[in-house]
Amino acid sequence: MKRILITVVLLSSLVSTFLFAVDIKKDSGDLKNSQNLRIESYSKAFKDGKFDKNKYIGISLNNYKNMVEYEASLTEKIYNILTDKQKKQLKEMLDS
């Protein structure tokens, strides 16, 4: 229970810090929307009443890759604005 509480408090702090940083960047006009999460539709795997298994797998892998890239970008942005103590806490949390 203690670990969950610590994790929730740390995540809450990270989110607050990140949202504050985003607000600052918006004000300065430096926020770029090029990192938007791109999700491809699965409907492309269903054409003419047929199911293309390879197309479905490709879409799934591409969507997963995009999600991981977005998550990594977001984590990098958060990490760059943390204090040294928060960076250590984040690393410990991710390693556990």
Image (tube, rainbow, N blue to C red):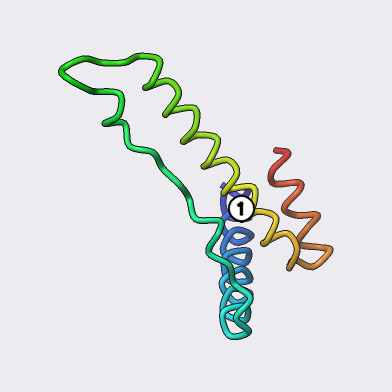
**Residue at disc 1, secondary structure:** helix
Closer to the camera in the image, 21 or 44: 44
Left-right relation of 6 to 61: right
Residue 35 % position (x, y)? 56, 56
Closer to the camera in the image, 23 or 6: 23
Closer to the camera in the image, 84 or 63: 63
Q: Residue furthest front?
A: 48
Residue 63 % position (x, y)? 46, 36
Q: Residue furthest bottom?
A: 27
Residue 33 % position (x, y)? 53, 64
Q: Is residue 67 above or below residue 6?
A: above
Q: Which residue is mark 1?
A: 7
Determine crowd level at label 1: few under 14, some 14-19, many 20+ residues with C-alpha closer than 10 A: some
Residue 42 occupies quadrant: top left
Residue drawn where x is 22% and y is 22% of the image: 47
Left-right relation of 51 to 15: left
Q: Amino acid at mark 1?
A: Thr
Number of numbered tags placed on the structure image: 1
Q: Is residue 93 above or below residue 5?
A: above
Residue drawn where x is 75% and y is 54% of the image: 89
Q: Residue furthest right?
A: 84
Residue drawn where x is 58% and y is 67% of the image: 32
Residue drawn where x is 63% and y is 76% of the image: 30
Residue 78 occupies quadrant: bottom right
Quadrant (top left/top right/bottom left/bottom right) for the C terminus? top right
Residue 85 occupies quadrant: bottom right
Q: Is residue 2 above or below residue 17?
A: above
Closer to the camera in the image, 22 or 44: 44
Residue 81 % position (x, y)? 73, 68
